[in-house]
Image (cartoon, rainbow, N blue to C red):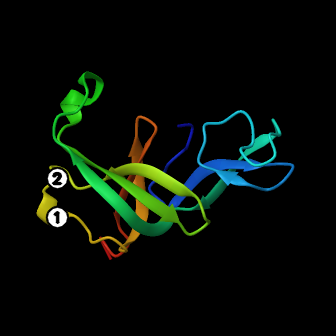
Amino acid sequence: MSSVLSASPVIEILRCADCGQLDPGPRELCASCYSPRMEPVTVDGDGVLVSWTLVRRPPTRFQADGPYAVAVVDLDCGVRLTGRLASVPFEEADAPPLGARMRVCGGTAGMALFAPADAGR
């Protein structure tokens, strides 16, 4: 994933210069019109949690990170993004409920980190 993350709640994704379709990337061709003119754009990192799962036995490449929670968040801009829940160490009881407002709070190794939008306020 080529997304650039920061401490502020914004994230960089791709937009087709021809049809305007947004995409989390990485992608060389637009999934809508097949144009090769994909450009990076910055969008708000807020959204809604639609799913999550706990990875108890991570693949070898991510073994040092485990266990960790993978989350699917529908960003307010209309893009569905997969990332991780930021709570470390993760406990299932700490998981936000489905439908909770989430915010990008950082990133690691090309992976977005999400936390509840009201965390730290």
SS label for mark 1: helix
Query: Outermost residue toward the right?
Result: 18
SS label for mark 2: loop
Q: Which residue is mark 2?
A: 90
x and y, in percent, of residue 120 in the image: 30, 71
Q: 52 or 121: nearer the eye?
A: 52
Left/right placement of residue 79 relative to residue 67 reads right
What's the residue at 22%, 45% (across, down)? 68
> Which mark is drawn over residue 94?
1
x and y, in percent, of residue 61 in the image: 29, 23
What's the residue at 80%, 40% (across, down)? 34
Above or below, 101 relative to 24: below
**From mark 1 to mark 2, how far is it between C-alphas?**
7 Å
What's the residue at 22%, 33% (across, down)? 58
Query: Which image quadrant for residue 66?
Result: top left
Q: Amino acid at mark 2?
A: Phe
> Which mark is drawn over residue 103?
none
Q: Amino acid at mark 1?
A: Asp
